[in-house]
């Protein structure tokens, strides 16, 4: 049987994983203690909804990894574009009564314009200064929507999506969980295809080269500025798409849940957990992070926790605290995240295999060498 070429192997694995997740809504298996929802049925609403949120943030993390992992830019403005997608889509659909596709198009258009303008300014500096400029843009937008300009954003109370005019396939966050689950799965698949296509192209190779040695690229007569701006724009558009899917899944938008700095920090943690600048790292890190967050919320709500001593009950009832400990442990003991751990294990296996080959070769040569007389 012929082996699959290495360049197609990742594609085959990705398609297999996509098909498996796409079939989950048809599997009514009872799986206790593992599922993140309140019910232990695999295709229940309580399980599909948390999994859809995992897919949503996995797609956003993949887009962020293009900027952070591949281009080497520490951006703290991802929440800005996530919130743009969520708010612009909600306002156009609920207040202006626009159809679904024009509302999506406008949300993406606004994200592109803001990404080009803010990126053009932020990329005039580098390092920590770049991170601070992107954070300033995100914070400015956060305070802008909190002030509720012209009554558009709802202030601290946020907005609720009126989906009466939307296609039936995306209506009803509770009654239509299966379709929204597939939409979230499709979003992460599209985000992965975009980022993997870019990083596999000549442009992607230049982006990685800029991360490794920007001065050398400049010496070759290539201006890194435009490639970094392209990376920022693509990542921002994917984040805006995540904001749209978020509104469809949750049904409401609040400044604290879509526009705060904690959103960006959470996405950064997802990428670091999985391993930045790798094909599967951001996807795995986001899925594990969000899954653990959903699962720990379920565990902390267990009534049996009330009988535990306070020294155990208090920390175990705080999922963010447990996730913080997990993140610190990973940074200290597993540098490079999940994919870093995999590649180190693979390198050790190859080193051991090459050592065995070397020993066998030397042994065969020794056997063939005639004794001295």
Image: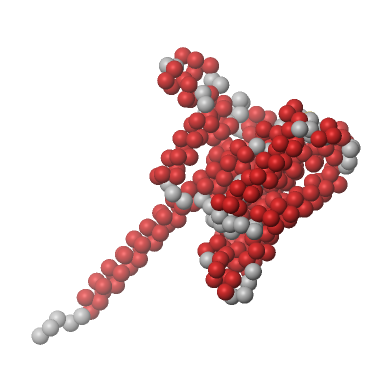
Position of the C terminus, as image quadrant, is bottom left
Q: Nearer the viewer, residue 305 or 371?
A: 305
Residue 45: image x %, image y %? 68, 30
Q: Nearer the viewer, residue 208 or 372?
A: 208
Q: Residue at x 29, y 72 (%)?
A: 361
Which color scheme did the rendering employ for the protein?
A: secondary structure
Point out the residue furthest to the left here. Answer: 373
Q: Residue at x 76, y 30 (%)?
A: 155
Residue 336: image x %, image y %? 46, 51
Residue 172: image x %, image y %? 78, 31
Look at the picture and state if 76 lies above or below 362. Answer: above
Q: Residue at x 37, y 57 (%)?
A: 348
In the picture, measured across the screen, residue 307 lies left or right of residue 277, that is left
Q: Nearer the viewer, residue 141 or 48?
A: 141
Residue 322: image x %, image y %? 49, 31
In the picture, measured across the screen, residue 296 lies left or right of residue 24, that is left
In the picture, measured across the screen, residue 328 lies left or right of residue 192, that is left
**Residue 343 visible (yes or no):** yes
Quadrant in the picture for residue 140? top right
**Residue 61 visible (yes or no):** no
């Amino acid at each position: 049987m012929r082996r699959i070429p290495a360049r197609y192997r990742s594609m085959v694995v990705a398609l297999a994983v996509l098909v498996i997740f796409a079939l989950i809504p048809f599997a009514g298996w009872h799986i206790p203690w593992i599922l993140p929802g309140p019910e232990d049925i695999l295709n229940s609403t309580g399980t599909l909804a948390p999994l859809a949120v995992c897919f949503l943030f996995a797609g956003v993390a993949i887009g962020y990894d293009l900027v952070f992992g591949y281009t080497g830019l520490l951006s703290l403005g991802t929440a800005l574009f996530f919130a743009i997608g969520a708010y612009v889509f909600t306002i156009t659909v609920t207040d202006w009564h626009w159809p679904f596709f024009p509302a999506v198009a406008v949300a993406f258009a606004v994200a592109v314009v803001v990404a080009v303008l803010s990126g053009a300014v932020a990329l005039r500096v580098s390092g920590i200064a770049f991170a601070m400029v992107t954070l300033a843009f995100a914070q400015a937008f956060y305070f802008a929507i909190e002030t509720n300009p012209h009554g558009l954003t709802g202030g601290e109370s946020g907005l609720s999506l009126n989906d009466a005019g939307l296609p039936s396939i995306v209506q009803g966050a509770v009654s239509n969980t299966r379709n929204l689950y597939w939409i979230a799965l499709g979003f992460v698949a599209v985000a992965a295809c975009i980022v993997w296509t870019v990083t596999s192209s000549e442009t992607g190779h230049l982006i990685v080269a800029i991360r490794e040695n920007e001065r050398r690229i400049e010496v070759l007569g290539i201006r890194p500025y435009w490639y970094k701006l392209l990376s920022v724009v693509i990542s921002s558009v994917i984040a805006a798409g995540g904001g749209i899917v978020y509104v469809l899944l949750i049904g409401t938008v609040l400044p604290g849940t879509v526009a705060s700095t904690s959103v960006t920090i959470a996405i950064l943690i997802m990428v670091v957990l999985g391993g930045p600048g790798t094909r599967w790292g951001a996807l795995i890190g986001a899925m594990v992070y969000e899954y653990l967050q959903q699962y720990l919320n379920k565990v902390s709500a267990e009534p049996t926790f009330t009988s535990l001593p306070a020294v155990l009950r208090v920390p175990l009832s705080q999922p963010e605290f447990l996730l913080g400990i997990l993140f610190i442990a990973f940074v200290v003991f597993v540098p490079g995240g999940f994919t870093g751990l995999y590649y180190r294990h693979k390198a050790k296996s190859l080193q051991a295999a090459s050592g065995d080959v070397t020993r066998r070769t030397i042994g065969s040569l020794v056997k063939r060498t005639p004794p001295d007389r």
